[in-house]
Image (cartoon, coloured by chain):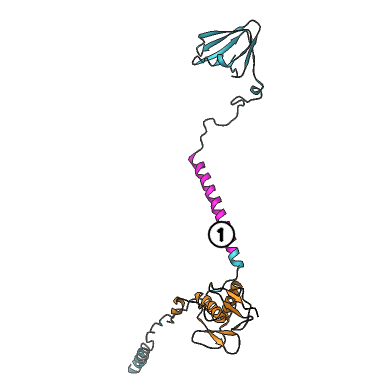
Chain colours: A cyan, B orange
Amino acid sequence: MTGINRKAVFLSVDGGRIDFVSDEGELMASVAIPPGRVDAAPYLDLNICGCTPQVLGVAVVNPPSAYGRQAPYPVESGANPDFQPTPVSALEGETRLMLRKLQMQSKRLDARMAAMQSVEHIPTREADPVIEPVEAVEPAPAPVPEKPKAVKAKAEAPVVE
Amino acid sequence: MSSRRYIKRVWRVPKDRGALDYFATLVVKALVKHGWPARWELAEFTDGFVIYEQGATGPLPSDMQRAAEIAVRIVARTYRVDVTQFDNWVGLNRSYTVTASGHFKEVKT
């Protein structure tokens, strides 16, 4: 019998044996169990390496705490047993934490700003307007006297012809 | 380019010249710290003073008037002084003395 709880009790009238069987099926040791009520822990403590204890001739009474406990992987689920969280998910967690911190900070700042707004304060005067130096306008009338000359020349041309 | 040197002046608020001077200097200091070219003059025969613009007399521009009103209100509330203000004239309603620690103390008669 495998899976004997350490707090289990061996009960028998005539006594029995506990066999330690290796994975290959070889009987490594066989230890006698005296009759009556015997604690299982010292027998399990023999711990002959890589062996499975098998009990013969005695009843194994497990403690109440041994019942109702789930064995590992009792259900065939579709979950990948080799799943390892990727570094991306760790990064995502960090990012979410940072975002939450930022939100908390912004909330605090907003509250402070609202408190500041509720208090009357002296308005700050705007700085004096900077007077930009006016750029010297290029003399526009300069080309004006040229045009009438051209017009005059054109006008004169037919007269010459 | 106009000079704004008055902003960088080191302000010493006189505690030995009476409550009105003290209050007026506090108000003008607060205004100047916020960039308003303010100065004050004693209003004769009234227990008060008048806030003027630097190098000018007469009523203040509207935005500066608003700032002056707020400054007077803040200083009065901070120092728990009972004041009256009418346009750019500000007066103390009660008689005060200035303590060495810079607080207004009402003179009980």
Residue under label 1? A109
Query: Camera-side residue: A151 or A86?
Result: A86
From the top left corner, tell me how far across and down residue A113 is, in percent: 57, 63
- Residue occupying the point 53% across, 11% down: A20
Query: Camera-side residue: B106 or A146?
Result: B106
* Chain of the residue displaying label 1: A
> Please, which residue is most extreme toward the left here?
A160
- Residue occupying the point 46% across, 77% down: B7
From the top left corner, tell me how far across and down residue A119 is, in percent: 60, 68
- Residue occupying the point 62% across, 17% down: A8
From the top left corner, tell me how far across and down residue A149 is, in percent: 35, 91
Which contiguous range is marked in magenta? Answer: A86-114
Query: Camera-side residue: A36 or A72?
Result: A36
Q: Residues within 10 Å of mark 1 (few under 14, many from 20)?
A: few
> Please, which residue is most extreme toward the top here?
A14
Amino acid type indicated by mark 1: Leu
From the top left corner, tell me how far across and down residue A78 is, in percent: 59, 30
- Residue occupying the point 49% across, 38% down: A86
Is residue B4 left or right of A20 when viewed as pictured?
left
Quadrant in which the C terminus of chain A is drawn: bottom left
Q: Is residue A84 above or below residue A56?
A: below
Query: Camera-side residue: A145 or A149?
Result: A145
